[in-house]
Amino acid sequence: DVKVTQSSRYLVKRTGEKVFLECVQDMDHENMFWYRQDPGLGLRLIYFSYDVKMKEKGDIPEGYSVSREKKERFSLILESASTNQTSMYLCASSSPGQGTETQYFGPGTRLLVL
Amino acid sequence: DAKTTQPTSMDCAEGRAANLPCNHSTISGNEYVYWYRQIHSQGPQYIIHGLKNNETNEMASLIITEDRKSSTLILPHATLRDTAVYYCIVRNSGNTPLVFGKGTRLSVIA
């Protein structure tokens, strides 16, 4: 079974702190994604990566950066956390295919910024 | 990617079939229909996908109309554990991320 793990289920940080959210997948997937989920807004794509050291902006990249130094690990970085970044963060991975790829999601990290 | 339209919420009695509709009237020829679900406090989970033909797996069946403008996800014998938000997504054959809408909140009632 594919496993996508996220470093924390719950996290509390202060405004202005630098925050690292880690995601690791064990299926040698090329593609990795970061989403955030907020009530009434659904899942929104922040950044994604199709290969090591590659990154692409999603729909809401402002205030975030990412790092993909190894194939299995994709990190989301909040350079200076703000209260409007309080959210559920979801990581996913997939292997490229002709329209048939399946995304596998981690359990999510619920981040509270005070 | 084409947009989808789903009802906001539905109820289903435990043990009955749950039929979740999805409209995707602007779907193009190379776009697949995917279904995911998200149980409370968990990440989304893949259910099934299809292009033209009806599909069935151990979780559900997917019925796609002949004109491909709509589809229905069928959970044949809904259980309380099927209570979740169900997302219908259309996606082209390229290597693009999934785009999630608001989905349908299915409540299975004992």
Image: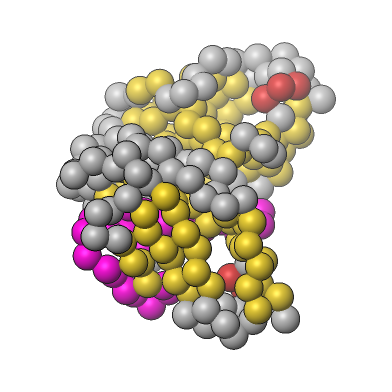
- How far across and down, in percent of the image, does residue B49 sit? 32, 59
Q: Quick check: B98 above or below B23? A: above
Most foreground residue, B82 or A17:
B82
B79 shown above or below A109: below
Question: Is residue A68 among what the camera can see?
Answer: yes
Q: Position of residue A13 (x, y in %)?
A: 75, 28
| Residue A91 horizontal side relative to residue B81, left or right | left
The span picked out in magenta is B33-60
The answer to whether residue A80 is above or below residue A37 is above
Q: Residue at horizontal 59%, vertical 46%?
A: A108
Q: Is residue A109 magenta?
A: no
Point 76% across, 27% down: residue: A113
Q: Does the magenta stretch include residue B58?
A: yes
Residue A26 x, y percent position in the rendering? 37, 53
> Which residue is drawn at the image coordinates 28% and 69% (left, top)?
B55
Q: Which quarter of the figure is the C terminus of chain B placed in?
A: bottom right
* Residue drawn 35% across the image and 23% down it: A56
Q: Which colour scheme is used?
A: secondary structure
Q: Which residue lies furthest to the bottom in this view?
A: B15
Q: Quadrant of the N terminus of chain B?
A: top left
Please indicate, yes or no, whether residue A25 appears anywhere in the rendered image.
Answer: no
- Nearest the viewer among B48 and A9 is B48
